[in-house]
Image (spheres, grey):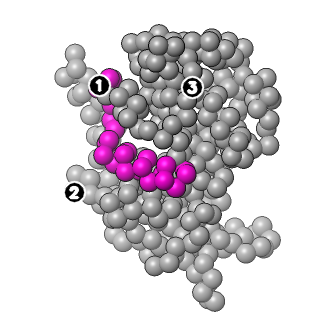
Amino acid sequence: MPFPSEDNLPIFHQKWWLSISTNNHFHIKEVKDSRGNLLAYFPYYIKKTYGLSVLRMPKYTRFLGPVLYLPPSKPFRKEQRIRHIVEKILSDLPRHDGMRFYLPPDHPGTFAFSLCGLKIEHDYTFQIPVSLPLENVWDECDHKTRNLIRTAQKRVTVERSSSLDEFIQLSKKERSRNTHNFPLLKRLVTEGVKREQIRLLHAYTEDRMLVASCILIWDKTTLYYWQAARDHHVNVAGSNMLLIWEAMKLAKELGLIFDFDGYSTPATAKMQASFGQLPTIRPYINHGNIAYRLERFAHETLRPKIAALFNR
């Protein structure tokens, strides 16, 4: 099946990304009009989880959802067309017990998915628009954040790199925190570097001790602060914030939106908010039958409690 121009697709929808992240086990649903013009392109991945078929994002993928190609029209006609496209996509999907995936911020199909009966939840990220100068970003940062960045600049040097070894080195130091699939990560980074869509930043002390590392990925519109690791045994205040600031500089050089790529803890969310930007909604589709909902309940509620018992 032909792909739309890769340059115009989000990185997580591009063929190389899908091929590596799913080991070529992805599918594509296309919706066309009566003249054969492409209206929607929806890559999806179905995985067996405890005997259930779940449409979900591959590991390391941040969002999916249909990419829409809509001709100019009045607002009502546009919304109507989007609803028909989403209905068509959902009706043509193979049998599945549940689905869970993020849509990109401001996706025009969120309302249509909701009208089709799918449960829509909200998560958040923070973004720096292309139009906002770095000087303004700096001024909008909390003063404590600026001070931490200045302090880190005196103690560490940040280098741009294409090497993943340093990132893996830091990640393996914190084994209890590590959830990486390193072989998969290596394949993604190797190909992304080759395509000039991935770069790493490493922070070193004066004696070349590595204290923090991050992986940045981007497409035609957005640069994502995708993965980060730091040495929790070395106290260099502000090293992560300095990496974020340097990543923002790269985004500006490339003329791209900077996306913090979400957060996993309230503390991280507060740190990101200290850069002075308002949160941006990332819609999350989490919908399924009774068996799927029971599996989700067990995964999200019971498993952490059981793990806590064994980790006492």
Residue occupying the point 39% across, 12% down = 233
- Give the residues in magenta: 173-197
Residue 101 is at least partly visible in this image: no
Name the quadrant containing residue 4: bottom right
Q: Mark 1 — residue?
A: 176
Residue occupying the point 52% across, 24% down = 203
* Residue neighbourhood size for the residue with mark 2, other residues' Cα within 10 Å, grouped as few (<14), some (14–19), many (≥20): few
Q: Where in the figure is residue 157, as x and y percent of width and height?
A: 57, 21
Q: Where in the figure is residue 282, as x and y percent of width and height?
A: 58, 45
| Mark number displayed over residue 158 | 3
- Report, in whole angstroms, how far the alpha carbon at label 2 lies from the one at label 3: 46 Å
Horizontally, is 246 left or right of 60 in the view? right
Disc 2 versus disc 3: nearer the observer:
3
Q: Is residue 194 magenta?
A: yes
Residue occupying the point 66% across, 35% down = 248
The answer to whether marks 2 and 3 mark residues whose Cβ atoms lie closer than 8 Å is: no
